[in-house]
């Protein structure tokens, strides 16, 4: 591996490879070695790498208009907002640049909505244990992980936590001070933990009953990763606000907050903004992504490949019961807990050496979030590589 200039802040534990290109579900390093990518840029490249529809949209838009600011309207953002509202059934859309910024917008919206109703004590954001919502101070305050929070105190006040999937705890803590309940339908960073449908249904009922907004963080689990375009469709529970990012533009930076009718009028002129939010090039890429979904049966492929991958992972977990716990997750966001935490990184490294890229999460979980276009043969190949990597680790 060539040594790159060490000018970057050392905040990432980078693998010892340098990626130079990619196509479909494969990445290529500087030595020409090919890797089957089963983490997809951490659930970002849903259509794989260098998808022609995305590349064409980016090139075409870049030749016409790259940036004009939000002082003016432009077609890509306007059309994308209309499409996301139509497909989600939401009323309004705000664009930003990342998932953390979408969470920040949702926090501000929830508090402003209560302010508009003159409920000045209703400021608390009630998040879940095990949550991860981003690295900015506001998103970090809603993140239940001491490792991410250490050294950054004091964090913004006005946040509390309810036990994930615990309806009784939610009923106790959702009081007149809560502006919103913030939930990931599938917690990715903590080790791939799906919400119970009953917990989400009760959250919806209690928010309606007690006057709080329900926010779903679909940054990692949305955009078709569970099958339907939106994770809330999978669970059959409609929130008031949805946050999106990651896969929306298949690799270009864009985030979005979708707002339902109940809070659509909370923000007024000047209440929030973003210089690059909904910029023409990433918005055009996101529109191309939606068009690809219309033209292909990605949802069916997610169901089929999820079933294939789940069956194979359960088989490996049974064969190597001393190494793995029971796999969990939904769609193509799956996790396999490793009983001895240090072995998670060992499996990841061994698989990478054989040409497979997988992720880790929660300290002791292998995370699988491949492109949604992954084929039956590619899933089989991934399992073969993992199986070949295990004997020396077990």
Image (cartoon, rainbow, N blue to C red):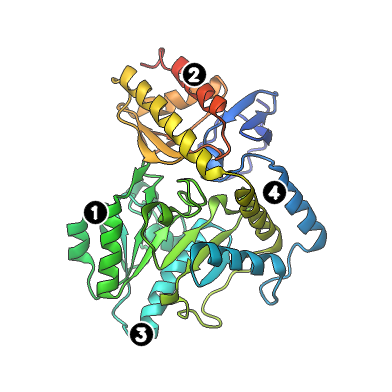
Q: Given the current orientation, which residue lies at the most extreme right position?
A: 63
Q: Quadrant of the N terminus?
A: top right
Q: Nearer the viewer, mark 2 or mark 1?
A: 2
Mark closer to the chain start, 2 or 1: 1
**Percent of width and height locating residue 280:** 70, 63
Q: Which of marks 3 and 2 is in front?
A: 2
Q: Can the viewer see residue 368 in this picture?
A: no
Q: Residues within 10 Å of mark 3 (few under 14, many from 20)?
A: few
Q: Nearer the viewer, mark 3 or mark 4?
A: 4
Alpha-carbon distance for marks 1 and 3?
28 Å
Q: How crowded is mark 1: few (under 14 residues within 10 Å), some or many (20 or more)?
A: some
Residue 378 lies left or right of residue 116; in this view the side is right
Q: Image height check: is 303 above or below 185? A: above
Circles 1 and 4: CB atoms closer than 8 Å:
no
Residue 206 lies left or right of residue 379; in this view the side is left
**Percent of width and height locating residue 158:** 32, 69
Secondary structure category for the residue under label 1: loop
Alpha-carbon distance for marks 2 and 1?
37 Å
Alpha-carbon distance for marks 3 and 2?
58 Å
**Percent of width and height locating residue 142:** 36, 59
Residue with the mark numbered 2: 384
Secondary structure category for the residue under label 4: helix
Residue with the mark numbered 1: 163
Residue with the mark numbered 3: 117
**Percent of width and height locating residue 171:** 19, 64
Residue drawn 30% across and 57% down?
200
Residue drawn 58% across and 60% down?
97
Mark closer to the chain start, 1 or 3: 3
Circles 4 and 2: CB atoms closer than 8 Å:
no
Residue with the mark numbered 4: 54
Circles 3 and 2: CB atoms closer than 8 Å:
no
């Amino acid at each position: 591996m060539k040594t790159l200039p060490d000018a970057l802040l050392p905040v990432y534990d980078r693998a010892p490879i340098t990626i130079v290109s990619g196509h479909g579900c494969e990445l290529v390093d500087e030595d020409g070695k090919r890797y089957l990518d089963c983490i997809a840029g951490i659930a970002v490249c849903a259509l794989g790498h260098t998808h022609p529809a995305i590349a064409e949209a980016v090139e075409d838009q870049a030749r016409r208009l790259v940036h004009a600011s939000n002082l003016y309207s432009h077609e890509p953002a306007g059309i994308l907002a209309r499409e996301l509202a139509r497909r989600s059934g939401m009323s309004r859309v705000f664009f930003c640049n990342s998932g953390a910024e979408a969470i920040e917008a949702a926090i501000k919206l929830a508090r402003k909505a209560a302010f508009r109703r003159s409920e000045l004590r209703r400021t608390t954001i009630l998040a879940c244990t095990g949550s991860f919502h981003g690295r900015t101070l506001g998103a970090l305050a809603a993140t239940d992980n001491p490792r991410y929070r250490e050294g950054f105190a004091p964090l913004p006040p006005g946040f509390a936590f309810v036990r994930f999937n615990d309806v009784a705890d939610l009923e106790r803590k959702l009081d007149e001070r809560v502006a919103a309940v913030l939930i990931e339908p599938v917690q990715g960073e903590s080790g791939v933990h799906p919400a119970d449908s009953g917990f989400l249904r009760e959250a919806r009922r209690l928010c309606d009953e007690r006057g709080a907004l329900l926010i779903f963080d679909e940054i990692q689990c949305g955009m078709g990763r569970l099958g339907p375009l939106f994770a809330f469709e999978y669970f059959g529970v409609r929130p008031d606000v949805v946050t999106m990012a990651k896969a929306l533009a298949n690799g270009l930076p864009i985030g979005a907050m979708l707002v339902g009718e109940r809070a659509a009028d909370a923000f007024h002129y000047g209440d929030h903004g973003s210089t690059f939010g909904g910029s023409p090039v990433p918005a055009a890429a996101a529109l191309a992504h939606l068009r690809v979904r219309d033209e292909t049966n990605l949802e069916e492929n997610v169901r089929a490949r999820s079933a294939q991958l789940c069956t194979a992972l359960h088989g490996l977990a049974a064969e190597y019961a001393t190494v793995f716990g029971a796999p969990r997750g939904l769609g193509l966001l799956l996790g396999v807990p490793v009983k001895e935490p240090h072995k998670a990184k060992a499996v990841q490294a061994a698989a990478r050496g054989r040409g497979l890229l997988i992720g880790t999460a929660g300290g002791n979980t292998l995370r699988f979030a491949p492109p949604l276009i992954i084929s039956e043969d590619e899933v089989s190949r991934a399992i073969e590589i993992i199986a070949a990597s295990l004997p020396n680790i077990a």
